[in-house]
Image (cartoon, grey):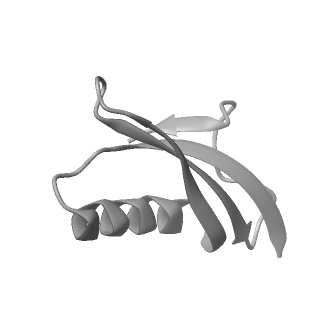
Amino acid sequence: MHTHFITLEVELQDSLARLHQGILTELQRQGEPLRWAITHVNPERRMVSVEAVITTPTEFLLPDKAVKRV
């Protein structure tokens, strides 16, 4: 089991429930989220930045970049 700190961007949604679900869906694509937080909201781009700690069974899943756009 490996622990990783990741940063990603998720599109801002019209409801908090859909935003929450979108963040969880994207995090689970990367691994098992241990904790996460929205660290920045850009209303002009309609994006939120999320920082998270995830665990994966292998070394790392993301390509070269630490930021992934969704």
64 vs 26, left or right, is right
Number of callouts: 0
Residue shown at the point (75%, 53%) measured from the top left: 5
38 or 6: which is nearer to us? 38
Residue shown at the point (36%, 36%) measured from the top left: 47
Residue shown at the point (30%, 60%) measured from the top left: 19
Name the spot of residue 70 as percent of width and height, x first: 38, 42
17 vs 54, left or right, is left
Quarter of the image with the N terminus in it? bottom right
- Residue 12, placed above or below residue 47: below
Name the spot of residue 38 as percent of width and height, x first: 52, 52
- Residue 41, placed above or below residue 13: above
Furthest-left residue in this view: 14
Choose top left, top right, bottom left or bottom right for residue 60. Answer: bottom right
Name the spot of residue 37 as percent of width and height, x first: 58, 59
Choose top left, top right, bottom left or bottom right for residue 24. Answer: bottom left
33 vs 60, left or right, is left
6 or 15: which is nearer to us? 15
15 vs 66, left or right, is left
6 or 64: which is nearer to us? 6
